Image: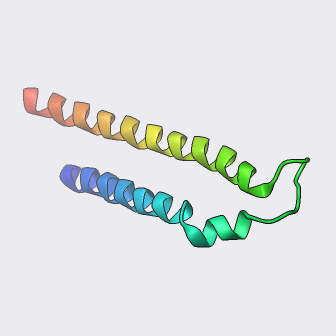
Amino acid sequence: MKDRQGDSTKEAWILCLILGVILINFPFIHIFNNQKMIFGIPPLVLYFYIGWPASIGVTWLFVRQMNRESRYRDDETME
């Protein structure tokens, strides 16, 4: 069960990585690349300014979770 929990975190990590790569490719960039303005800012700029910190936040959460699981496994092997 413990190994399965670590595997699911790694699977979710890979899924988020693939999703991040998809979100910075042509179809999504094309959707936000238009002449409309939101609060005087082009949507493509907002997309990057919101998406970049969001991806960093998700990465931070996954690394934090993986570190917790690693410490938990290390504590179990010490006993």
In the image, farthest residue toward the front? 35
Say whether residue 13 is left or right of residue 60.
left
Q: Quadrant of residue 1?
A: bottom left
Say whether residue 74 is left or right of residue 36.
left
Q: Residue at x 40, y 62 (%)?
A: 15
| Spot occupied by residue 21 in the image (x, y as percentages of width and height) | 46, 60
Compared to 41, does 18 lie above or below?
below
User: Which residue is nearer to you in this view: 32 or 19?
Assistant: 32
Q: Residue at x 49, y 57 (%)?
A: 20
| Spot occupied by residue 42 in the image (x, y as percentages of width and height) | 81, 53
Quadrant of the image for the C terminus?
top left
In the image, farthest residue toward the bottom? 27
- Answer yes or no: is residue 4 visible: yes
Say whether residue 66 is left or right of residue 1.
right
| Spot occupied by residue 78 in the image (x, y as percentages of width and height) | 9, 26
Q: Residue at x 67, y 70 (%)?
A: 30
- Answer yes or no: is residue 79 visible: no
| Spot occupied by residue 26 in the image (x, y as percentages of width and height) | 57, 69
Total label count?
Answer: 0
Q: Residue at x 51, y 41 (%)?
A: 56
Say whether residue 17 is left or right of residue 53.
left
Structure colour scheme: rainbow
User: Which residue is nearer to you in this view: 36 or 23?
Assistant: 36
